[in-house]
Amino acid sequence: MNPARLLLVIPCYNEEAILSLTYSKLNIYFSEIKNRGLIAADSRICFVNDGSRDRTWNIIEELCAQDPNVIGVGLSRNFGHQSAIMAGLEAHVDQFDCFITIDADLQDDINAITGMLERHREGAMVVYGVRGDRSSDSWFKRFTAEKFYVLMQKMGVPVVFNHADFRLMDRRVLKELGNFREINLFLRGIVPLIGFRSDKVFYNRLERQAGETKYPLSKMLLFAWNGITSFSTFPMRLVLYFGVFNFFVAMVIVVYILFSYLVGFTVPGWTSTMLPLTFFSGSNMMALGLIGEYIGKIYEEVKGRPRYIIEKTVNE
Ligand code: UDP
Ligand code: MG
């Protein structure tokens, strides 16, 4: 079997402090696995500049000038991590056999790439990089990340535990990924939806080698919220549940109000104020939840996701 042509895609946002180091480490690693026959000689490294405000793009240009195996893609502004990854991938679908995405900061252990390529050789179409040990992350990051994965799974999003965006995809999978047309990309949720045979490779998450995280708490929360709302209409369904509950409570209160009125417990005006107030707020909430259900359906439809993906056919 011929070695696969690999494209490594690296999203970069304000990474001037580390880019040269990342490149030199990858370059050494690349020659090594080329020599071992794990990847084809025309495998390449693609840096995607996600609208950085520092010298990131200049560095990418310099790297391209000295090494023809480096590809530079520059986005017109900051589109975010997920879109930067997609930009690098989609621009080269037809030129490579498999694709690995990895962060610029060397937190993901590049040595895991060998394992990914081996799994791919054995027939896995997707190989997830899974963090075995996260002790280099702060306890806060570990805690929030773990809760995040649990919450996602509870809400029906098939995320792989402790897997971020360090993964290998076969060209076939990438082509199918292109059919998910939503703008709010949450790759960790979408890739498992594509199916095909997958495998995992475990690695230890390292310290960021230089520069600072581009995911401060606010961005992290936004990312998590995006992930949940792009995949699950459960938060909206809660409104319906709450509405139905409210409606029944309102009915009980209505009975109580009528009873008080008939027995003569009340002051004038109380019944005529309380009755519509209770009744309409209960039914309003329920109606809102009902409308929400339809909006949820519309949301599912406008995403235009493929209904199914055929892996193979026989005798066709
Ligand atoms: N990144 C990007 N666009 C952004 C934010 C981040 O391309 O708007 C890149 C960043 O350069 C890095 C990767 O996404 O290669 C992950 O970011 P970071 O390491 O800062 O996140 P953390 O590991 O702290 O969660
Ligand atoms: Mg990082």
Image (cartoon, helix red, strand yellow):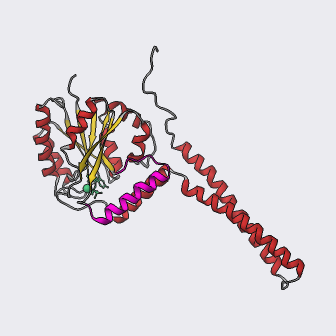
92 in relation to 275, above or below: above
Quarter holding the N terminus is top left
As for residue 146 lying within the magenta part, the answer is yes
Position of 301 with respect to 146 (left or right) is right
Identify which residue is drawn at 34% across, 43% down.
86
Looking at the image, residue 82 lies above or below residue 281: above
The answer to which quarter of the image holds residue 256 is: bottom right
Nearest to the observer: residue 92 or residue 9: 9
Which residue is found at the position 33% from the left and 33% from the top? 125
**Quadrant hosting residue 175:** top left
- From where the camera sits, is residue 285 visible? no
Does the magenta-highlighted stretch encompass residue 144? yes
- The picture places residue 75, in percent across and down from the top left corner, at 30, 48
Choose between 98 and 113: the one closer to the eye: 113
Q: Residue at x 15, y 29 (%)?
A: 37
* Ligand 2 location (quadrant): bottom left
**Residue that protrudes farthest toward the top in the picture:** 315
Residue at far bottom of view = 267
Q: Specify the segment rendered in magenta.
A: 137-161
x and y percent of residue 66 in the render? 10, 41
